[in-house]
Structures are given as structure tokens and as C-alpha cells.
Image (cartoon, helix red, strand yellow):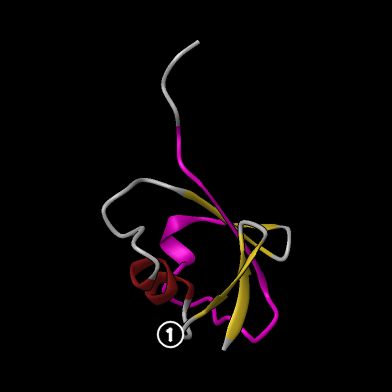
Amino acid sequence: MTIVCNGAEREVESRTLAEVLRELGYEATGVATAVNGRFVPARQRETVLLSAGDALEVVAPRQGG
């Protein structure tokens, strides 16, 4: 299915947010996520199902000042 991840269309096979993050290579990093503008805590990612056209935002923390 096609979703929008950080503003770019991406084709994914997975259905849950946790699976999509792994598929897109985010499994080893600590990230914040939102689906369709709503924050999704890490503990809920296994239960959040994505649908075609959903907008996923993935933000990684940065160091600096």
C-alpha cells in the first residue's frame, strides 16, 4: 500500500505502525511518531493499523544546541 512518510510517498507491505517502522529502517533508532497528525506513543505502535494514504511522520532526536 502507499503511505506518505515525512512528506514522501512510500510503498510498504506492512500494516501496523511498528512493522512499517521496521520495514523503513527505523527499528534501531529512538524516534517519535505521528499518524495523520496524531502522536503515537511507542507502546501503542504494535496496535496502530495503517491504511493506504495515511500520513506518517517520523522524527529522530538530534543533539546540539
**Is 53 placed left or right of 45 in the picture?**
right
Quarter of the image containing the N terminus? bottom right
Tell me residue 51's x, y (percent).
Answer: 63, 85
**Is 44 placed left or right of 19 in the picture?**
right
Q: Which residue lies at the image location 55% right of the left edge and 82% below the top edge? A: 49
Label tally = 1
Tell me residue 35's x, y (percent).
Answer: 64, 65
**Is 4 placed left or right of 12 in the picture?**
right
Identify the residue at the far top of this view.
Answer: 65
Asked if residue 6 is positioned above or below residue 32 in the image, the reply reads below
Q: Which residue lies at the image location 70% right of the left edge and 80% below the top edge? A: 53
Helix, strand or loop for disc 1: loop
Question: Magenta stretch: residue 58 in it?
Answer: yes
- The residue tagged 1 is 14
Tell me residue 4's x, y (percent).
Answer: 64, 69
Span shown in magenta: 40-61
**Is 55 placed left or right of 18 in the picture?**
right
Q: Circle 1: is it few (<14), some (14-19), or many (20+) Cα within 10 Å?
A: some
- Between 56 and 6, the one nearer to me in the picture: 6
Question: Magenta stretch: residue 57 in it?
Answer: yes
Which image quarter: residue 24? bottom left
Tell me residue 5's x, y (percent).
Answer: 59, 64
Q: Amino acid at mark 1?
A: Ser
Asked if residue 41 is positioned above or below residue 54 in the image, the reply reads above
